[in-house]
Image: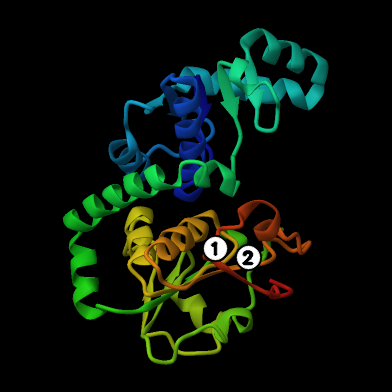
């Protein structure tokens, strides 16, 4: 079975968790593939393959498969019946179907806690080992650890969320969760110049994508003694890992502007608290 990669690290960790669980149940190795038509193929993807490759899950690049799927996406825009026939013939399935075990190629995000919690101990161990490798080779993380041996993290998702249906969470929603005794570290995908517009308090340190990779950011999340996440899959993984170390972690109750309660419905984690949140308007 092959599963198409989708999105960035947080999304791909959910896909990996699903693939790992499927491999355990079926006793077959699953391949997760990237392609140039649907996702970026860069250092982050190579690191993911290096850290998480196992006898259960293999990572690869297949531009041929990507081209086929892109062509099918084009067909679907105009005629759903031929699209369905092609998918049936090529044994292509989509997340949510009840017959995925009969498919050769699967597409989806698999953003549900159940795919992680079903094999929680193994997934936690493999991720912890991967994060240890990241930390051991990163000069940035070594310098950061010297400056902040103990800290709390807020993940501030800006960038592509501004003006989108996901929405940017109002900082007032999580300001009350801060520990006044701990330094505040902000991890953001936005520009540092944007931070003052959204925060009603002073951060001790702000980390942008120019300073750390997604894997390094996940290490910073995991090593925090308090974690406050937002409506982001990378935040979900940070909360999961911090809570498994026995420290407080928080995620929003609502994950998009229509106030859908994704945390309660699909993303609930034992040991992680949900906070009531509002979204900034007119962004």
Q: Is residue 108 left or right of residue 8?
A: right
State if disc 1 and disc 2 touch (CB < 8 Å).
yes
The answer to whether residue 129 of the structure is visible from this angle is yes
Residue designated by label 1: 159
- Name the residue at 63% across, 13% down: 91
**Is 224 drawn above or below residue 119 in the view shown?**
below
**Is 122 drawn above or below residue 89 in the view shown?**
below
Quarter of the image that includes the C terminus: bottom right
Local secondary structure at mark 1: helix
The x, y position of residue 266, in whole percent, is 66, 51
The x, y position of residue 244, in whole percent, is 41, 61
- Name the residue at 46% across, 22% down: 63
The x, y position of residue 141, in whole percent, is 24, 65
Local secondary structure at mark 2: loop
The x, y position of residue 84, in whole percent, is 75, 16
Q: CA distance from mark 2 to mark 1?
A: 6 Å
Label 2 crowd bin: few (<14), some (14–19), many (20+), radius 10 Å = some
- Name the residue at 68% across, 25% down: 73
Q: Is residue 241 left or right of residue 270?
A: left
Q: Is 158 or 260 nearer to us in this picture?
A: 260
Task: Name the residue furthest top.
Answer: 89
Residue designated by label 2: 162
- Name the residue at 40% across, 37% down: 41
Q: Is 217 or 68 nearer to us in this picture?
A: 217
């Amino acid at each position: 079975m092959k599963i198409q990669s989708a999105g960035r690290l947080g999304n791909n960790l959910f896909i990996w968790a699903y693939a790992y669980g499927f491999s355990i149940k079926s006793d077959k190795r699953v391949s997760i593939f990237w392609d140039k038509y649907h996702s970026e193929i860069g250092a982050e993807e190579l690191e993911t393959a290096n850290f998480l490759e196992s006898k259960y899950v293999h990572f690869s690049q297949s531009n041929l498969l990507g081209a086929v799927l892109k062509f099918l996406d084009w067909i679907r825009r105009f005629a759903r019946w031929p699209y369905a026939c092609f998918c049936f013939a090529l044994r292509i399935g989509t997340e949510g179907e009840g017959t995925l075990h009969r498919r050769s190629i699967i597409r989806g995000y698999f953003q549900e806690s159940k795919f992680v919690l079903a094999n929680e101990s193994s997934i936690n161990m493999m991720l912890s080992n991967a994060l240890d490798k990241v930390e051991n080779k990163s000069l940035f993380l070594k310098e950061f650890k010297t400056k902040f041996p103990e800290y709390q993290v807020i993940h501030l998702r800006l960038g592509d969320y501004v003006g989108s249906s996901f929405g940017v969470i109002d900082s007032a929603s999580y300001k009350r969760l801060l520990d006044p005794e701990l330094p505040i570290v902000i991890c953001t995908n936005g520009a540092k110049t944007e931070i003052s517009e959204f925060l009603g308090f002073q951060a001790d340190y702000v980390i942008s994508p120019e300073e750390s990779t997604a894997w390094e950011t996940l290490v910073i999340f995991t090593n925090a003694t308090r974690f406050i996440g937002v409506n982001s899959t990378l935040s979900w993984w940070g909360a999961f890992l911090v809570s498994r170390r026995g420290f407080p972690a928080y995620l929003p109750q609502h994950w998009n502007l229509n106030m859908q309660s994704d945390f309660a419905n699909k993303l609930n984690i034992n040991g992680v608290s949900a906070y009531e949140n509002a979204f900034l308007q007119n962004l």
